[in-house]
Image: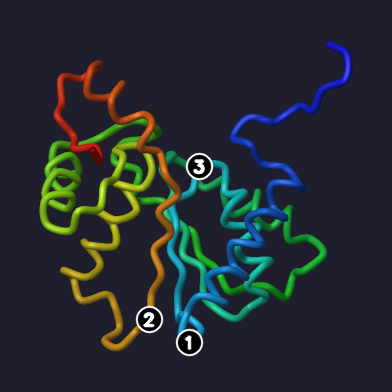
Amino acid sequence: FGDYYLIPEGGTNLEALKGSAELGLEILQQSSKVPDEIRLCCGTGGTAAGLIQGLDGSSFVQGYSVLKGEFHKTFIKRFLIDQPALTNWQIHTDAHCGGYAKTRPELLHFIQNFAETHSIFLDPIYTGKLFYAFWGDLQKGKIKPGSSIVLVHSGGLQGVAGYNERFGTQLPLPD
């Protein structure tokens, strides 16, 4: 193929982790205090691994898998092999709504209502699942009062129009 750079499936490699580590530093710089937790959705787990490295133990990282399985934990540990003391993280494997690109009516309803109420748009594959799981934790009283928590909205809106077309939904998009 000539001179090229191969991006692995999921986009995760050591170079990608450097960018995700910078995300952690940016969150710390832009916050008035160090957040107790930073929560994000996970595909391969690469963004979570980089974020964990960038935060260097200063905040607890909660990853919410959009895929079935427990592989994230092994994957992240492999990327943190040189930093085994970084234990400031957890991966939740029950927020996937049936697996990658799978949804449930209650998730789609939540995405619709969340956009109408907060003018924050979510996709049904990644960020919607994160925010939906967080909302569930709030409703169940699992969030410690007074906690400072950052939710990472990692995008995904570019796929909503295609999702709507394919499945006949009307998930909201920004104008």
Question: From this viewpoint, is residue 92 visible?
Answer: no
The furthest residue to the top = 1
Quarter of the image for residue 56 reads bottom right
Q: Is residue 31 visible?
A: yes
For discs 3 and 2, the disc positioned in front in the rendered view = 2
Q: Is residue 50 above or below residue 55?
A: above
Dot 2, how many residues are within 10 Å of its Cα: few (below 14), some (14-19), or many (20+)? Answer: some
Q: Secondary structure at mark 1?
A: loop
Q: Residue 82 appears in which quarter of the rendering? A: bottom right
Instruction: Name the residue type under label 1.
Output: Lys
User: Quick one: 1 or 96, which is closer to the camera?
Assistant: 1
Label for residue 148? 2
Q: Identify which residue is drawn at 77% across, 69% down.
A: 83
Q: Amino acid at mark 3?
A: Gly
Q: Tell me whether circle 3 and circle 1 mark residues in contact (CB < 8 Å).
A: no
Q: Mark 2 belongs to which amino acid?
A: Ser
Q: Are marks 1 and 2 in contact (CB under 8 Å)?
A: yes
Q: Earlier in the sequence, mark 1 or mark 2?
A: 1
Does dot 2 land on a helix, a strand or a loop?
loop
Give the residue at mark 3.
43
Question: Residue 33: which disc?
Answer: 1
Q: Residue furthest right?
A: 2
Q: CA distance from mark 3 to mark 1?
A: 28 Å
Label whose residue precedes the other's in the sequence (3 or 2): 3
> How far apart, in angstroms, are the residues tagged by discs 1 and 2?
8 Å
